[in-house]
Amino acid sequence: MSRLAVEHLRSSGASNAPACFIPPADRRWTRLLAETPHDVYHTPGYVTVAARQENAIPVALYAEYGSAASLVPLLLRPVPEHLGAPPGWLDAVSPYGYPGPLIAGNPRVDVTSRLLAACKDGARDAGIISIFMRSHPLIPLPPTSMRSLGRAVRHGDTVYIDLRDHQDEIWHRMRENHRTQIRRLVNGGFTSRLDQWEQLPQFVALYLRSMVRHCAAPFYFFPERYFVELREALGGGLHMCTIHGPAGELASAGLFTETGGIVQYHLGCSSDDFRRHAPSKLMFHEMQRWAAGRGNRIFHLGGGVGCQSDSQLFQFKAGFSPLRAGYWTFRMVLDRARYAELIRRRNALMHDATPAGSNLFPLYRDQTCRTPEDTRPFQTAMSHSS
């Protein structure tokens, strides 16, 4: 991240602004989290690790109104160098995951709308060109307030388990073939282990092979240092579950976060040698039992590829629970002149026009030459588990 970009961030945090960017070390960040339900994606540690991965500045848009306050975790990114934009041109994106806006103190719709409008104005005043914001399916805000931010896109549903239900109920709500395969795995000698971190290198190697198999986007080929830094940042809030075959072989593995009563499935993979056994089904089953035993409220499995309900991945997760939560993203163009200029530069470099139906935002970051018919959603690797 350039020195100029850092100075730009510091200058944008004037106390008289309607909203300001605050760094992870700002006490207002941790104070707001202590006052309202939140998830791992809202924590300074997680946002900082995500920023390192994307060569970005970790920040939160913070605003106050009366006794209420809002917090929006974001990553500030310089415009791609190949577009030749002047130094200091920045856009913003939510960290990878579900870091939707938080409101503390007064959740009334009118107050929420006022706070979110202040955040949007504050980002515009700081010179941010655009913002791509992800919602949190389990911590929703009023739709009318969120739609005022910009274009709202509903991508589909995510799957979760209510851990406050009795284990017998959770088990019987599971799809029958899931229950059958879990029994076969247990009877066949497959076992689960938790937090055996000496196996992290094996997990990383297996994960990268899985990303190759799924043809994941380059972003999702996380290096080993990402997992090490994530564990250091989250401490006891990050857990690794591994499933082993009868001879002790690593069959499946996943990373899970635990924050404020919410357990999230973060990343996972399975060995090619054991795919026909579906060992990840045992992993999810064991993790929900473990999470419930620790008094957590929700186990969130996430959605499918692009959060599409007709994807094979979503159908796999849907077999664990009938409970659903909607996932939205919000796209805000704050400086239309600079946004249009960047699209012009992108199109000139790519020798094509960005398809009107493109799902990527901001459009000037689209480096693919596609036909208008190719509007497949940007694939995520968060939930590749098969």
Image (tube, helix red, strand yellow):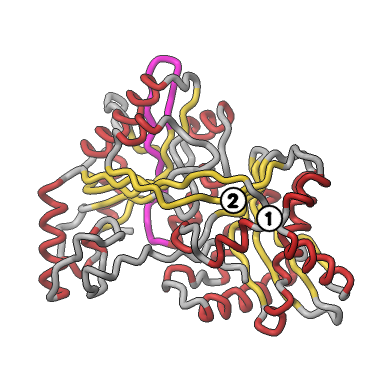
x 16%, y 53%: residue: 339
Give the residue number, with chain letter if any, for mark 2.
159
x 48%, y 68%: residue: 220
Give the residue number, with chain letter if any, for mark 1.
320
Extreme residue toward the front, this view: 176
Image check: 127 left or right of 229? left
Quarter holding residue 323: top right
Q: Quadrant of the N terminus?
A: bottom left
Q: Secondary structure at mark 1?
A: loop
Image check: 117 left or right of 108? left
Between residue 318 and residue 358, name the one nearer to us: 318
Q: Is residue 201 visible?
A: no
Between residue 32 and residue 248, name the one nearer to us: 248
Q: Secondary structure at mark 2?
A: strand
Which amino acid type corresponds to the residue marked 2 in the rendered image?
Val
Q: Are dots 1 and 2 in contact, CB under 8 Å?
A: yes
Between residue 177 and residue 149, name the one nearer to us: 177
